[in-house]
Amino acid sequence: MSGIIKTETLGAYYWLTKPGIVYGNGITAVAGFLFASGRDINPLLLLAMLAGTSLVIASACVFNNYIDRDIDAIMARTKWRALANGSISGRNALIYGTILGILGIAILVAYTNPVVVALGLVGWMAYVVLYGYTKRHSVHGTLVGTISGSTPILAGYTAATGHVDTAGLILFFVLVFWQMPHFFAIAIYRYDDYAAAKIPVLPVKKGLDKTKNQMLLYVAAFVVATLALFLLRFAGYVYGIGMAIIGVAWLRLAARGFKAADTTKWARQLFRFSLIVLLTFSLLISINAYVV
């Protein structure tokens, strides 16, 4: 970026990184690290992992915004984005995203381990390239998108352990199964946006009934995966009881969708509750070493 960025423009560059995604993935990355570390926490390693991972995610989001600038201009929920409304040029966005990505990978290389670096690169490629393509061309774009959304928690875990193992893989799939109903809920209550932009999400291509079936199955898979950590003795009783309670509650809410008088309202409720579920899961694995 040449010249001085005006003060009123700084906010546009901030939002270009999709901070909600960065913060959300940062929470799961930290949770994965704390879960793997137990009571032996290396704060400097944690900070480096979080900084590097967050910068890589921010870079991927900037590139995704660049790729999606045409369809973002069509959708009501995204037409305000800087690349969609022209307040930031495509050239400056690409330079910005590249700098963020290089800084993030450099931090991971310098302070973490090769597994974390590899996960950072895989997550970046999955979001920018694989998801960027399949989002426009396949009903399975949502599933492809879960790859990048599940790598941060595994990156946090492997930053502490140095390797991928059974517990780490379970964490990865927990996030895969969580994302599917979470994003299907968005696709339902933003149905008109996706239809207008001709994005082939499941509700638009296959209908609401099939989407509700898929959501119920993925929530059930999420419950099974979370409880697997307890059943395989990677997590304790407080975690197991807590996740069983909130998992069943989410499952019941998903099942209510089949009889919902207002599907849009129900989808918003499920979306909001999914955030509570993720925060609860992240908290419980973070404190697992300190409770029974």
Image (cartoon, rainbow, N blue to C red):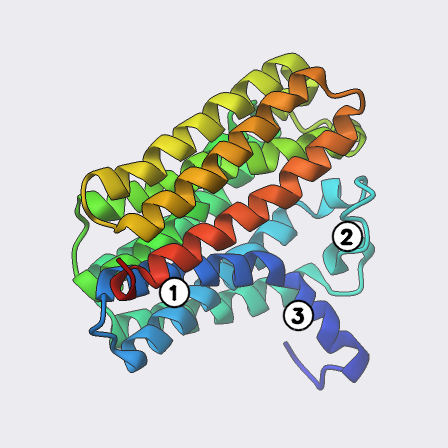
Residue found 71% across the figure and 48% down from its top = 69
* Mark 2 residue element: helix
Residue where numbered disc 1 is placed = 30
Mark 1 and mark 3: span between their CA atoms? 22 Å
Q: Quadrant of the C terminus?
A: bottom left
Mark 2 and mark 1: span between their CA atoms? 32 Å
Image x and y of residue 238, in percent = 34, 52
Amino acid type indicated by mark 3: Tyr
Quarter of the image where one finds residue 244 = top left
Mark 2 or mark 1: name the one nearer the start of the chain.
Answer: 1
Q: Quadrant of the N terminus?
A: bottom right
Residue found 77% across the figure and 29% down from its top = 264
Residue 14 versus residue 99: which sits nearer the camera?
Answer: 14
Of the two numbered discs 1 and 3 in the rendering, the one whose residue sits closer to the viewer: 1
Image x and y of residue 255, in percent = 59, 21
Tags 2 and 1 in contact by the CB under 8 Å rule?
Answer: no
Image x and y of residue 115, in percent = 22, 57
* Mark 1 residue element: helix
Amino acid type indicated by mark 1: Val
Residue where numbered disc 2 is placed = 84
Image x and y of residue 33, in percent = 30, 63
Mark 1 or mark 3: name the one nearer the start of the chain.
Answer: 3
Disc 2 residue crowd, few under 14, some 14–19, many 20+, Cα 10 Å = many
Q: Is residue 109 above or below residue 225?
A: below
Residue where numbered disc 3 is placed = 14
Mark 2 or mark 3: name the one nearer the start of the chain.
Answer: 3
Residue found 77% across the figure and 75% down from its top = 9
Disc 1 residue crowd, few under 14, some 14–19, many 20+, Cα 10 Å = many
